[in-house]
């Protein structure tokens, strides 16, 4: 026994020494060889004009202040936004400001105010507008160009602002008031979340959302950059003032803002005036306003706007002597509890959980908690399965199994063991869920998709859902503080479901319950509107989507007559139902714009889904944009001054207006240090210690 | 029977624990090597992905299909060490290269760009970094941004957070000290470098 142990010991120590020496020489070589690379060509740096103070802090050459005037009339919100750009430098400046607006906004005007002169902007095709702008820039004329880069992201380019002067630019948009669970809401976004920034397409990080290939090639678009607001006492950066003329059309109660301190003053019986309690606030948090209606009866409502054809700007006029009025309507369905007293449906639920690397940290914890809560919310009679995916996918069961204590326990063990790791290959997992065999008991298949939305190819995702959805429905749980809202909205539309956002652990339970309420109650389906002759009406989005419990829905439509006797028809839990609609007499100006916007959105969706000829669809969108004067991704507003401000010999510098980092986002003002050590040395030392100890023990055997 | 009696319980225990210690020690050693080999070998694939990124910057190119990150920039200290910067600073991607911290400005933008890396692999060259050394950052469009080291600070991450400032600078973060036996130590080296390149303003 003695000799072998000794030899083993000697052998190991020799091997150990060899390995150590090899490792260290490799380590030394490592930093020299492996990390060597080539330096690329040098070129001009950034094109941003920045002034610096003594401490190295940047001073903006171009600063912004804004004024927001909202006019809320019934369910339509007209917002007038004024942006004042001040050039604090001694040079002529051309600047850009990337800013958010609600993704439901139909932007319909742009004007520049110079002293007492007002220059009205026109809507043009994107490329043409850009040409006009660039020409004006060269000629030294003041000009403004407003483009839509994403549904909720816009860019204002202003040029030839003389030193020390202010340019005042106004724009307006229309959107519908949001309505949910007895509460009405409007919001005005003030800044972007930086994380969102990192995913903005074009020449920065790869886009999460490459809706329009045009955007991708538009290299002039710069990623928005950010600055921090100074602490209390210092000047407010990006100040904004706000006033709301509020005419809800009924006696509103609980008029509150969850985001800002506001003052509400009565103007007359019907309307109120709302403003910030301080005149100016920094543009670092979105403005939210909500109110409630005392009247509990929530009947479907229909709002109608009559447009005389001469009112339609730049309308098709040639050859039409007959002036025909057009009627645009907004239908609002707010299914209350009384429609939903049917028994709870049995269902097959397939959960898909994203366990890719991007879900690491809090996201996966929230996702797992959401999934565990969801499993608890299943009923006997339901069947279910869980699919996790990252680079690959794994299913809990081969096929969906009935929910019982045994399957529940198995599911919980499976979920608890999940870890975020690897890539994001969602398509195979989605296909597995959508193509799984049809349930024997013909339970409706509901797919619940839990993800942060950081998926590789969004269009592919949308197309896959559209192609394989069949009779199933897809609900998404958006995880994280800044998920890609637009993606989830699209997924819900195509997947005939809804989505909720979970950004904090304490929301998990209540949000999952609300999803399950929607899943478990029968939806109103096959909805259509008929007039008194029984003719089915054409609607701007191709059809009325299914309506879920507690989920309000807005439908835009064009009526052939202003006739108010309309009937809503559909099925619920297999039974036919009919309901007469009441027409609201509230002023409904702006409905035509909302209709135009809905129509444009429907066309954009078709484009995303690859249905129809892209060129034709694009042309249709441009025509609608011109006809209704609504900004789209393919058109821009352009306004050019006639007067030349800058002489050719005077220089023009570029300066961008920064957005403020969102207020209170701890993670953005300061952030955690990442873990930055592999602990190689402690590991080597540990291994050395262990092996020495082992050897000592071995040698002692011989001595004794 | 004899053999067994000669081998007292104590010696038997010694033999077993000796073997176990050697085995665990050996495994730890292999693991430490594996971490380094992984970090090194991946560079070949990341380099390929970077070449693709430079030629078609509108898309991201993952170094391998199941990766959850991709190269976004190339970082070089002085004339010597260059590394590829990955799109995220999660623990997973840091194993393969320094990562861009998403909380900071995007690479190539005017603003504070933060990059974190492992002290004992890709960022080990920061050991030799000195004030006023030049750092260059090549973005995906091939544009080179030049910075000069202005401050080097040691911070305790258990007491401080990383402050984001409104400055046009590059911040490199790694663990400190470089040679220590402590695991998961709280100290960090924070190297700040401000942009030195003269900017061109005019756009014809």
Image: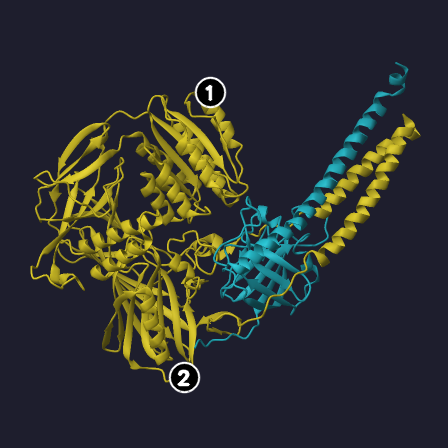
Chain colours: A yellow, B cyan
Residue A375 visible? The answer is yes
| Image quarter (top left, top right, bottom left or bottom right) of the C terminus of chain A | top right
Q: Residue A673, how many percent across, how many down?
A: 57, 52
Closer to viewer: mark 1 or mark 2? 2
Q: Is residue B111 left or right of residue A633?
A: right
Which is nearer the eye, A540 or B30?
A540
| Image quarter (top left, top right, bottom left or bottom right) of the N terminus of chain A | top right
Q: Is residue B14 above or below residue A636?
A: above
Q: Residue A551, how many percent across, how many down?
A: 27, 39
The part of the image, by quadrant, that contains residue A3 is top right
Q: Residue A455, how many percent across, how many down?
A: 45, 46
Q: Residue at x 33, y 63 (%)?
A: A147
Q: Secondary structure at mark 2?
A: loop
Which is nearer the eye, A610 or A68?
A610
Near mark 1 (Cα within 10 A), the count class, few <14, some 14-19 or many ≥20, is few
Q: Disc 1 versus disc 2: distance between alpha carbons?
A: 79 Å
Chain of the residue that carries numbered disc 1 in the rendered image: A
Which is nearer the eye, B169 or A473?
A473
Q: Is residue A458 left or right of residue B106?
A: left
Residue wearing tag 1: A406
Residue wearing tag 2: A650
Q: Is residue A618 above or below residue A505?
A: below
Q: Secondary structure at mark 1?
A: helix
Chain of the residue that carries numbered disc 2 in the rendered image: A
């Amino acid at each position: 026994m003695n000799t072998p142990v000794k030899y083993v010991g000697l052998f190991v120590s020799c091997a150990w020494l060899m390995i150590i020496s090899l490792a260290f020489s490799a380590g030394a070589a490592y930093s020299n060889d492996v990390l060597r690379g080539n330096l690329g060509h040098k070129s001009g740096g950034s094109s941003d004009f920045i002034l610096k103070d003594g401490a190295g802090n940047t001073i903006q050459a171009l600063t912004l202040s804004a004024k927001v005037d909202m006019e809320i009339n019934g369910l339509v919100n007209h917002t007038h936004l004024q942006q004042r750009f001040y050039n604090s430098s001694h040079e002529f400046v051309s600047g850009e400001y990337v800013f958010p607006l609600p993704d439901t906004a139909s932007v319909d005007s742009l004007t520049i105010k110079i002293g007492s002169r007002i220059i009205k902007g026109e809507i043009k095709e994107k490329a043409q507008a850009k040409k006009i702008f660039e020409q004006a820039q060269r000629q030294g004329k003041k000009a403004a160009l407003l483009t839509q880069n994403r549904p909720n992201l816009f860019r204002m380019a202003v040029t030839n602002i003389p030193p020390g002067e202010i340019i005042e630019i106004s724009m307006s948009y229309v959107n519908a008031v949001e309505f949910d669970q007895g509460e009405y809401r409007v919001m005005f976004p003030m800044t972007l979340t930086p994380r969102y920034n990192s995913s903005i397409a074009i020449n920065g990080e790869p886009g999460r959302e490459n809706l329009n290939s045009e955007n991708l090639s538009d290299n002039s678009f710069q990623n928005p950059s950010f600055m921090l607001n100074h602490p209390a006492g210092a000047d407010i950066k990006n100040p904004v003032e706000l006033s709301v003329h509020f005419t809800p059309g009924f006696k509103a109660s609980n008029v509150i803002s969850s985001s800002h301190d506001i003052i509400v003053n009565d103007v007359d019986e019907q309307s109120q005036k709302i403003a910030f309690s301080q005149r100016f606030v920094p543009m670092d948090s979105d403005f939210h306003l909500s109110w409630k209606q005392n009247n509990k009866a929530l009947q479907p409502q229909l709002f109608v706007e009559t447009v005389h054809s001469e009112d339609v700007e730049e309308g098709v006029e040639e050859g039409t002597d007959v002036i025909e009025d057009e009627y645009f309507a907004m239908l609002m369905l707010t299914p209350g509890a009384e429609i939903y007293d049917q028994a709870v449906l049995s269902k097959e639920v397939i959960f898909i959980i994203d366990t890719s690397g991007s879900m690491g940290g809090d996201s996966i914890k929230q996702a797992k908690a959401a999934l565990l809560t969801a499993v608890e919310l299943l009923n006997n009679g339901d069947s279910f399965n869980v699919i996790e995916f990252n680079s690959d996918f794994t299913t809990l069961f081969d096929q969906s199994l009935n929910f019982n204590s045994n399957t529940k326990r198995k599911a919980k063990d499976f979920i608890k063991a999940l870890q975020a790791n690897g890539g994001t290959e969602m398509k195979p997992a989605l296909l597995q869920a959508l193509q799984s065999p049809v349930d024997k008991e013909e339970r409706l298949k509901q797919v619940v998709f839990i993800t942060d939305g950081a998926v590789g190819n969004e269009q592919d995702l949308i197309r896959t859902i559209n192609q394989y959805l069949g009779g199933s429905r897809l609900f998404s749980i958006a995880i994280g503080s800044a998920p890609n809202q637009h993606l989830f909205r699209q997924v819900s539309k195509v997947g005939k479901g809804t989505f909720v956002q979970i950004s904090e652990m304490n929301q998990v339970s209540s949000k999952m319950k609300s999803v399950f309420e929607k899943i478990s109650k029968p939806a109103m389906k096959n909805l259509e509107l008929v007039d008194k002759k029984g003719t089915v009406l054409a609607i701007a989005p191709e059809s009325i989507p299914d309506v879920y419990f507690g989920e309000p829905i807005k439908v835009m439509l064009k009526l052939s007559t202003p006739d108010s006797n309309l009937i809503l028809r559909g099925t619920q839990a297999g039974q036919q139902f009919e309901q007469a609609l009441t027409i609201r007499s509230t002023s409904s100006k702006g409905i035509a714009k909302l209709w135009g916007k809905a129509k444009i959105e429907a066309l954009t969706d078709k484009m995303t889904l690859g249905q129809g000829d892209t060129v034709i669809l694009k042309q249709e969108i441009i025509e609608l944009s011109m006809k209704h004067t609504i900004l789209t991704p393919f058109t821009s507003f352009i306004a050019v001054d006639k007067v030349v401000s800058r002489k050719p010999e005077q220089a023009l510098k570029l300066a961008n207006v920064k957005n403020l980092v969102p207020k209170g986002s701890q993670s953005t003002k300061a952030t955690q240090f990442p873990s930055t050590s592999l602990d190689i040395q402690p590991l080597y030392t540990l291994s050395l210690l262990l092996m020495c100890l082992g050897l000592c023990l071995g040698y002692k055997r011989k001595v004794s | 029977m004899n053999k067994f009696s000669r081998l007292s319980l104590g010696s038997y225990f010694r033999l077993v624990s000796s073997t176990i210690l050697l085995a665990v020690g050996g495994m730890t050693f292999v693991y430490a090597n594996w971490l380094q080999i992984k970090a090194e070998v991946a560079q070949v694939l990341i380099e390929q992905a970077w070449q693709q990124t430079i030629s078609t910057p509108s898309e991201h190119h993952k170094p391998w299909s199941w990766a959850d990150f991709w190269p976004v920039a190339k970082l070089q200290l002085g004339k010597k060490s260059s590394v590829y910067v990955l799109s995220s600073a999660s623990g997973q991607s840091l194993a393969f290269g320094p990562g861009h911290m998403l909380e900071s400005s995007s690479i190539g933008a005017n603003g504070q760009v933060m990059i974190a890396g492992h002290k004992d692999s890709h960022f080990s060259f920061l050991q030799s970094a000195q004030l006023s050394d030049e750092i260059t950052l090549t973005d995906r469009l091939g544009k080179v941004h030049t910075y000069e080291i202005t401050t080097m600070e040691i911070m305790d991450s258990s007491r401080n957070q990383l402050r984001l400032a409104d400055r046009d600078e590059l911040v490199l973060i790694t663990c400190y000290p470089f040679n220590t036996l402590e695991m998961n130590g709280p100290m960090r080296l924070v190297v700040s470098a401000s942009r030195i390149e003269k900017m061109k303003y005019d756009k014809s």
